[in-house]
Image: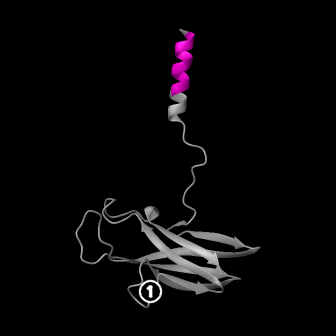
Amino acid sequence: MRVVFFCLATALLVISCKKSGETENPNLLRLADCKNYTYNGETVSLCFDSLIADSRCPEKAMCIWEGTAIAKFSFTKNNTTYPVKLSTHDFYPQFPKDTTIENYKIEFLNLYPYPGTHSLPVPFYKIKAEVKVTKL
C-alpha cells in the first residue's frame, strides 16, 4: 500500500512541476517599462513609452491590408535620450521598422497581444513590444 501511495504522490508531483529553464523572451518590453542593455561595459537603455497606433488585421479576419503597429520609444546613452517612433512594417517613411542611434540598431519586431486574441480594451500592462537592440 505504501508503494502505491508513494508512486501516486511522485506522479502528481512530477505532473504539477514547471519545466526548469523556462524564460520570457528577452526581446519583450512591456509598455511603460525600460530595459538596460550592456555591450562591452557600455550600458544603454530602451523604453517603450507609448503605443501610437495599431491598425493590424485582427486574427481570423479577412483584410486587404495587413496593417501595422506604431510605437514611441526612448533610447538613452550617456545620459542623452533620443525619442524614436518605430513601426512593425516599413509602410510609412516617418515610421521606419528600425533605426540606428549612436552605433546601436533598434528594431521593432512585433507587438503583443495580436488584435483579436484578447478582449477589448487590452490592459496597458499586457501590451508588449518585441524589440531587438544590437551594437554595430
Quarter holding residue 100: bottom right
What residue span does the magenta drawing correspond to?
2-11
Q: Amino acid at mark 1?
A: Phe
Q: Quadrant of the C terminus?
A: bottom right
Residue 110 rendering spot, x and y as whole percentages: 45, 70
Residue 55 rendering spot, x and y as whole percentages: 32, 76
Q: Residue furthest right?
A: 41
Whether residue 6 is in magenta: the answer is yes
Nearest the camera: 76 or 23? 23
Q: Main secondary structure of the magenta part?
A: helix
Q: Is residue 46 above or below residue 101?
A: above
| Colour treatment of the image | one colour
Residue 129 rendering spot, x and y as whole percentages: 48, 69
Q: Secondary structure at mark 1?
A: loop
Residue 90 rendering spot, x and y as whole percentages: 42, 84
Q: Residue beneath label 1, please?
A: 95
Q: Residue furthest top?
A: 1
Which residue is located at x 54 percent, y 22 percent?
9
Which residue is located at x 24 percent, y 77 percent?
64
Q: How many marks?
A: 1
Q: Is residue 122 left or right of residue 46?
A: left
Q: Is residue 17 above or below residue 37?
A: above
